[in-house]
Image (cartoon, rainbow, N blue to C red):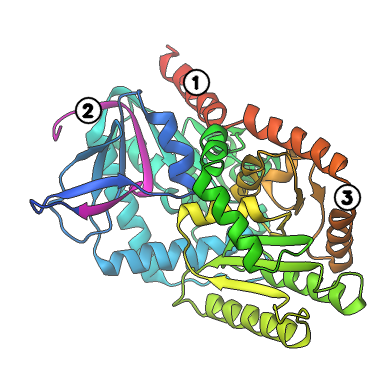
Amino acid sequence: MTNATFPLVVVSNRLPVSFSVDENGARVPTLSPGGLVAAVAPSLQGRDAAWVGWDGTESADSEPAEVEGIALFPVSLSQDLVERHYEGFSNGTLWPLFHDVGVESEFQESWWEAYQEVDATFAQRAAEVVAPGGIVWVHDYQMMLVPGLLRALRPDVTIGYFHHIPFCAPQTLQSLPQHAELLDGTAAADIAGFQRKGDCDNFLKAAGKFLGADVSVRAETYPISLDFTAVSTASGDPHVLARAAELRSEWGDPRTVFLGVDRIDYTKGIPERLEAYEALLRSGQLTVEDTVMVQAGSPSRENVPSYQALRARIDAIVSRINQEFQSSDGRPAVIYSAQNLERAEMLALFVAGDVMVVSSLRDGMNLVAKEFVACKNDESGVLILSPFTGAADRMVDALIADPTTSVELQSAMLQATAMTPEEQQRRMVALREEVRTHDVAWWAERILTDLASKATRP
C-alpha cells in the first residue's frame, strides 16, 4: 500500500484513529470517537479512500495502515511543531479569531512559521497519495494553506475544503497580519464549504476584498450532521438504558433534569447556562427539589491561560450555587463533572436528560444538539438551542434562546419545564425527522457529488 494512490483523499490535522499494541508488538489502529471522525469516516467506507493526518507520534517511519476500509497515511510531527502549529497558531490565534466572542487572539511569528511548515508537509503527503485526476478533501482551520500548496504540487486534482468552525467578518479577519495568505490558500480549492450562509458570505466578502477579482473558488453551505441511525440504535442498547435509569436515581429522580454536555471551551456558554439556572432558583421559579442541572464537560487545552480561567470560573459558579441550594435529602443543585466520558456514558446522559441546554456563544454546528435528539427514541425531551449555532438554522422546533440575554435563556428553561408531553412529542418528532433526513450521509454525498462534478468537467 506504500506506493498505492487513491481517487479520494481526506486531509485533516489528526488521523481518525487511536493506536494500541498487539501481542506481537505491532501498532493496531481503531477508529476513535469524535465529531470529525463520526461525520467523515462513514462517508468514505466503500469509496477506495485514503486519509492523511498526524498519527500522534514524532517518529518519521510511520507506515500506512488500514482501518474499516480506509487507508491511513500518517504524518509525523515533532512535539515542538505540534505545540506551535496546533496549540499555537491554530488554537491560540485562529480559534479565538474565527469565533470572535471577546477572547483575544494571540500571535507569535514562530507559530506562523510552524503553521506554514506543517501545512506544507500535509500537502506533500496528500500529493503523493492522490491518484491522477483524483479528489482531495481538506478539513478545517488547521489546514487552510493546504489547498494552495497542493494546487502547486498537483494541478490535476480537484480540491475541496471544509471549514467546520465559524468564519468571522472580514474586518475581524483583517486584524491578523497573515489574513491574505490564509485566504489565498483556501481560495485555491475548487469548492470551499461552510456550515452556515453567514460563514459562507463572510468568506466570499473577505476573499473579494483582500484577494481581488481573481477568486474562482465556489463557496457553498453544507451543514454537517451525524449518523442518526447509529446513534439512535446505540442509545437504545439495554446497558445504556439501564445506566440512564441508574443516573436518574443517583440524581434523586427529580421531575426535570437540565443537561449540558460540552467540551470546556469559552465558546460554549457554560457560565451563562449555569447562571441562568441559578437566577431561576434564586427567584423561586424553579426549586432544587424538582430540578437538577447536570453539566458534563470534557477538559480542553488545559495549559492555555484562557481555558484555565474558564475552568476556575465554572468551578466558582458551581460551588456558589451548591452552597446556596441543596435538596432536602442533600443533593446539590448542580452535578458537575469535568472528565472525558466513555461513549456509552455520554449516550446514557442524553437518554436520562429532559432538557438539553445548548447555550453556545458561537458554534459552527454543534453536533451535541443532534446527538441528544437522536437518542430520544421515546420522543420525549426538550432542546433549548442558541441561535449562534449552525444547528439552529434547521432545528427550528427547538426552543431558540439567546444565551447572552439571561432573561431569554431563563424563559426558555421555564417554558421547557412547563411543556406538556404532547407538545414535547410534537417538537421531538419533527426534530428527529430533520436529523434523520439530513444525516451525515446526506452531508457527505452533497459535497462529494459537487466535487466529482468538478473533477469530471472538461
Label 1, secondary structure: give it.
helix
Q: Quadrant of the N terminus?
A: top left
Mark drawn on residue 5: 2
Which residue is more in the foreground, 174 or 43? Answer: 43
Q: Give the range drawn in magenta.
A: 1-20
Sequence-wise first label, 3 or 1: 3
The image quadrant of residue 108 is bottom left
Q: 10 Å neighbourhood of mark 2: few (<14), some, or many (≥20)?
A: many
- Residue 53 visible: yes
Identity of the amino acid at label 1? Thr
- 12 in magenta: yes
Give the crowd class for mark 1: few <14, some 14-19, many >=20 residues within 10 Å.
Answer: few
Locate residue 419 relative to residue 58 in the image: left or right.
Answer: right
Residue occupying image coordinates x 59% and y 43% = 207
Q: Mark 1 points at which residue?
A: 449
Is the stretch drawn in magenta largely helix, strand or loop? strand
Residue 71: percent from left, percent from top: 26, 35
Total marks placed: 3
The quadrant in which the C terminus is found is top left
Q: Is residue 139 visible?
A: no
187 falls in the magenta region: no
The foreground one among 177 and 154 is: 154
Q: Dot 3: what SS?
A: loop
- Amino acid type at circle 2 is Thr
Residue 450 at x, y percent in the picture = 52, 22
Find the distance from the CA under tag 3 to the CA under tag 1: 42 Å
Q: What percent of the width, then of the height, locates residue 403?
A: 78, 62
Query: In percent of the image, x 64 and y 27: which residue is there?
Result: 437
Label disc, if present, on residue 419 of the rendered structure? 3
Left or right of 411? Residue 208 is left
Q: Is residue 441 above or below residue 276?
A: above
User: Which structural element holds mark 2?
Assistant: loop
